[in-house]
Every structure is written in structure tokens, then in C-alpha cells.
């Protein structure tokens, strides 16, 4: 369950509305960060900084409420669950109509590769679409001493693992982002039996819809073709996930101006996007949006570990920066000259 809060400006009537998204969910990781507020539940950790996003969203809402005499229109702060897994919370936000009357949206993500006090942002695709797939390879069992009498499903699956990488390296322009990752392989159960079934799972991440469609098509062709060439069979279950986040140029410029006013122009970085996915993409499909990265790296504090690492931690000095940038960007968007 999530929460949406509207802060309505009191400077005059206006129908303009902007959203601030703060995702709230944790990950199935056992925390080893050592901070005094570490998770006490094994297998539950805020290893992607969504607790920081929630704190900044809340702080921004408090600041906006205190300053509501200075702007017209509405700022909707959405505390969104389920960014990390299906059913994706961003899709649900759209389905529930929370963006139907919205003009723009702002999202941020803490960035352990960028120093505290800096913001990274860029135009165009800023995260990749992420789709998931499962493959079942079916062969025939045999004694491990006589593999020629069976069809080795594991051997067929392994050939698929390597062949699928050629979609990326030999079929797609190197400047067109595409990542195909096999993240699981399972098969067999006994030392002396050739496996009659093997399972693969993984992700396809892409920056453009045409590339996405090509990767889907070629994955099916390669899997089914390799299975057939080995006298095996295969089933492919491909599921469409979140699209890429597309940063609107005008919203990017608004973040840059707002951030520069707070941090100085030198601390506003023009940086390429991430190969990670984020369901803020569903927001960017509905309205002009910007997704920026807030630096949280501080080597002295040990805030150096990547997202989804058990020792990940946030430099808390960054939280006030993020909250003020969210607040001021929303207010600046709602100014009459906007």
C-alpha cells in the first residue's frame, strides 16, 4: 500500500499539478552496513536507498506546506510501493489514475558513484526498459555413462547462454544500449543421470522500443532454433516490464537551474543514464518528467558500496540537499512564468 499527499498552494487559483515520486520498498537482503538504524529483520534491507527517498519526499512535503503561500497549483507527493518487483507500483499508480490530471513529475535516486553535494542528470532515455524471461529446455534422460542415448538439456541450455550474447555484440549498434543477462540456470538432480530438463531465467534491458522488439524476437528464434538443432524442445515465457525513463528536456533544464542555485553550477553534472530500470518510467510515459541522481558518496563515512550491496549506506548530509531540490523544483515549476 502506498500514500498520495497533495500540498495545495495558496498564492492563487491554478490547475497546474506536479508530482514528486518517493519509492518506499526494501529488498530481500540481510543488512551488514553497521549503521545504528540497521534492519533487525534478516533478509529485509533498504539496500537501494528507498528509505532515503521516503525521508526526502516527506521533508519536501513539509517544506512545501510551510511555503504554500509562495506558489499556486498542487504538488502531489506519491509514496510508492513495489518499485523493485512485480506487480510494479509505478504501473499501478497510472492504472489508479493518480497521474491523469498531472502536468509533470519528478523522481530521484540516490547515487553511490557520485559525491555528496553533486547532482547528475541528462536528457532522453535515462534508465533502460527491463523485461524478464524464463526458458524451459526439454530433452531426454539417459545414464551419465551413455549420454548418446539421451538429449542433454543442460548442454543445450549452456549453448543458449553463450549464443544469446551475440544479440548484443553482433546485432546491435554499440551506441544503442542493450543488456541481456542470464541470471539463473537449474537442471538435473543426480550425479549419474543426464538431465531431461533445464531452466534458464534472465533479463533484457533496452533503451529503445525497436531494439527491445528485436531482442524479444531474436531470443525466441535463438532458443527455439538451438533446441531444434539438438533434437530438444524449448518453451519461452517473456514478460514485458517497465519501459525506459525518458527525461523531458525542459524538466531537465528546470532541475539544472534549481540545483545550480543551491549547489553551484560546477556541482550539476551532465551524465549518461543508468542501465538499471525504474518504474518511474510509467510516470514519464504519462507526463513531462525528470529523473535525476543525487550524490551520496562519502569515503570517510564508508558510503562507498553499490546499490543492492549488504553494506550499502547513505551519506545523510545528502538528504537535506535532495529534499530542498525536490521542493524548490516543484515550486519553480508552478511559478506563473513556467
Image: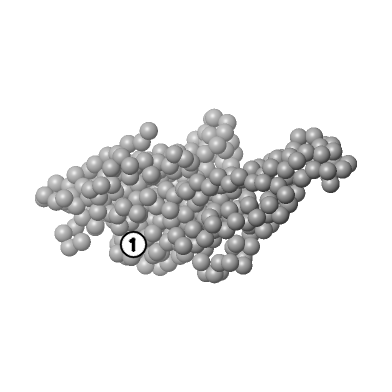
Q: Farthest residue toward the top?
A: 41
Taking the image as shown, residue 207 lies to the left or right of residue 19, namely right
Q: Quadrant of residue 42?
A: top right
Residue located at (70% from left, 47% from top)? 232
Q: Position of residue 176 (x, y in %)?
A: 51, 66
Taking the image as shown, residue 229 lies to the left or right of residue 206, namely right
Name the quarter where the C terminus is drawn. bottom left
Q: Farthest residue toward the right?
A: 145
Name the quarter where the N terminus is drawn. top left
Q: Is residue 65 visible?
A: no
Taking the image as shown, residue 203 lies to the left or right of residue 100, namely right
Total numbered circles = 1
> Foreground: 265 or 226?
226
In the displayed structure, would residue 291 be above or below residue 122? Answer: above
Q: Position of residue 203 (x, y in %)?
A: 56, 50
- Using a 10 Å C-alpha cutoff, classify the residue at mark 1 as few (fewer than 14 neighbours), some (14 to 19) or many (20 or more): many
Q: Farthest residue toward the left?
A: 12
Q: Position of residue 183 (x, y in %)?
A: 62, 47
In the displayed structure, would residue 145 be above or below residue 125? Answer: above
In the displayed structure, would residue 11 be above or below residue 54? Answer: below
Residue tagged 1: 248
Residue located at (55% from left, 37% from top)? 28
Residue located at (58% from left, 67% from top)? 171
Taking the image as shown, residue 168 lies to the left or right of residue 148, namely left
Residue located at (22% from left, 43% from top)? 7
Q: Secondary structure at mark 1?
A: loop
Q: Quadrant of residue 267?
A: bottom left
Q: Is residue 205 visible?
A: yes
> Foreground: 73 or 238?
238
Amino acid at each position: 500500500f502506498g500514500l498520495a499527499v497533495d500540498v495545495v498552494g495558496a498564492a492563487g487559483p491554478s490547475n497546474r499539478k506536479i508530482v514528486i515520486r518517493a519509492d518506499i520498498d526494501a529488498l530481500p537482503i540481510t543488512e551488514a552496513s553497521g549503521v545504528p538504524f540497521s534492519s533487525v529483520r534478516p533478509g529485509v534491507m533498504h539496500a537501494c536507498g528507498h528509505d532515503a527517498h521516503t525521508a526526502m519526499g516527506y521533508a519536501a512535503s513539509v517544506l512545501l506546506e510551510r511555503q504554500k503561500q509562495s506558489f499556486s497549483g498542487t504538488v502531489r507527493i506519491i509514496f510508492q510501493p513495489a518499485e523493485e518487483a512485480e506487480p510494479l507500483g509505478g504501473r499501478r499508480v497510472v492504472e489508479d489514475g493518480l497521474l491523469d490530471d498531472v502536468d509533470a513529475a519528478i523522481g530521484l535516486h540516490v547515487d553511490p558513484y557520485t559525491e555528496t553535494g553533486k547532482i547528475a542528470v541528462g536528457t532522453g532515455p535515462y534508465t533502460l526498459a527491463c523485461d524478464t524471461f524464463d526458458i524451459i529446455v526439454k530433452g531426454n534422460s539417459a545414464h551419465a555413462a551413455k549420454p548418446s542415448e539421451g538429449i542433454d538439456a543442460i548442454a543445450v541450455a549452456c549453448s543458449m547462454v553463450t549464443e544469446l550474447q551475440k544479440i548484443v555484440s553482433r546485432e546491435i549498434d554499440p551506441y544503442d544500449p542493450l543488456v541481456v543477462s542470464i541470471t539463473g540456470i537449474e537442471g538435473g538432480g543426480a550425479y549419474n543421470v543426464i538431465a531431461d530438463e533445464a531452466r534458464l531465467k534472465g533479463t533484457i534491458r533496452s533503451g529503445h522500443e525497436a531494439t527491445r522488439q528485436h531482442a524479444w524476437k531474436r531470443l525466441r528464434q535463438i532458443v527455439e532454433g538451438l533446441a531444434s538443432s539438438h533434437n530438444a524442445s524449448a518453451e519461452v515465457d517473456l514478460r514485458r516490464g517497465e519501459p525506459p525513463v525518458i527525461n523531458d528536456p525542459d524538466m531537465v533544464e528546470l532541475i539544472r537551474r534549481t540545483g545550480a542555485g543551491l549547489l553551484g553550477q560546477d556541482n550539476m553534472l551532465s551524465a549518461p543514464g543508468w542501465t538499471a530500470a525504474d518504474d518511474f518510467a510509467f510516470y514519464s510515459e504519462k507526463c513531462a518528467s525528470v529523473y535525476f541522481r543525487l550524490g551520496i558518496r562519502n569515503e570517510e563515512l564508508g558510503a562507498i558500496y553499490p546499490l543492492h550491496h549488504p553494506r550499502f549506506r547513505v551519506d545523510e548530509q545528502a538528504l537535506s540537499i535532495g529534499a530542498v531540490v525536490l521542493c524548490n523544483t516543484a515550486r519553480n515549476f508552478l511559478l506563473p512564468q513556467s
